[in-house]
Amino acid sequence: MKTFSTIMRSTLAAVIALSSAQAFAHGDVTPQAVDTSALPQLGEEWKTTNPFTGNETAIKIGDSAYNQNCARCHGLEVISGGITPDLRKLNDENEFFSQEEADEWFLMRIRNGAVIDGRVYMPPFEGILSQEAMWAIKSYIETRGTPE
């Protein structure tokens, strides 16, 4: 029985250590470059609504860009593990009054990040990702449906 107890304590310690490492690693992502050369260039002025909604090329680029830059925090296939906002809610008509409002919120957050009480919950991506890359990511998110 002593051996079983020792094994259980060791297992519990390992689970706690691994969970802690994952929690502290949250948000520890080095932004990756996104090749948007296959998309129309949007210019210097920021669009207020997604110009790439339904664009298959943008969705493919957005899928890759999301997985390289966003999935670590927001979850694979845009399914949040609960630590960060579930981005599929951007597709939920009960969360936003309109798709335009959801686009506006998305763009504000991805450009400026989220800092609360001096803590960085999400880094700003303006100057790192292009407008085309940001809207491609949003186009991919739009294909993921809404949370159940």
Image (spheres, rainbow, N blue to C red):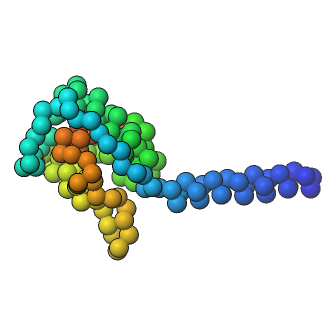
Look at the image and tell me in which quarter the C terminus lies: top left
Dividing the picture into quadrants, the one containing residue 136 is top left
Dividing the picture into quadrants, the one containing residue 60 is top left
Residue, x 17% and y 31% (percent of image)?
A: 39
Residue extending farthest to the top is: 56
Image position, residue 10 (x, y; %): 78, 55
Residue 20 visible in rendering: yes
Q: Pick whichever, 84 or 125, lies toward us.
A: 125
Residue 110 vs 145, above or below: the answer is: below
Residue 100 vs 54, above or below: the answer is: below
Image position, residue 102 (x, y; %): 19, 48
Residue 25 vs 42, above or below: the answer is: below
76 relative position to 139: left or right? right
Image position, residue 46 (x, y; %): 10, 49
Residue, x 45% and y 55% (percent of image)?
A: 28
97 relative position to 61: left or right? left
Residue, x 75% and y 52% (percent of image)?
A: 11
Residue 102 visible in rendering: no
Q: Pick whichever, 14 or 36, lies toward us.
A: 36
Image position, residue 57 (x, y; %): 23, 26
Residue, x 34% and y 40% (percent of image)?
A: 66
The number of discs equals 0
146 relative position to 3: left or right? left
Q: Pick whichever, 127 or 58, lies toward us.
A: 127
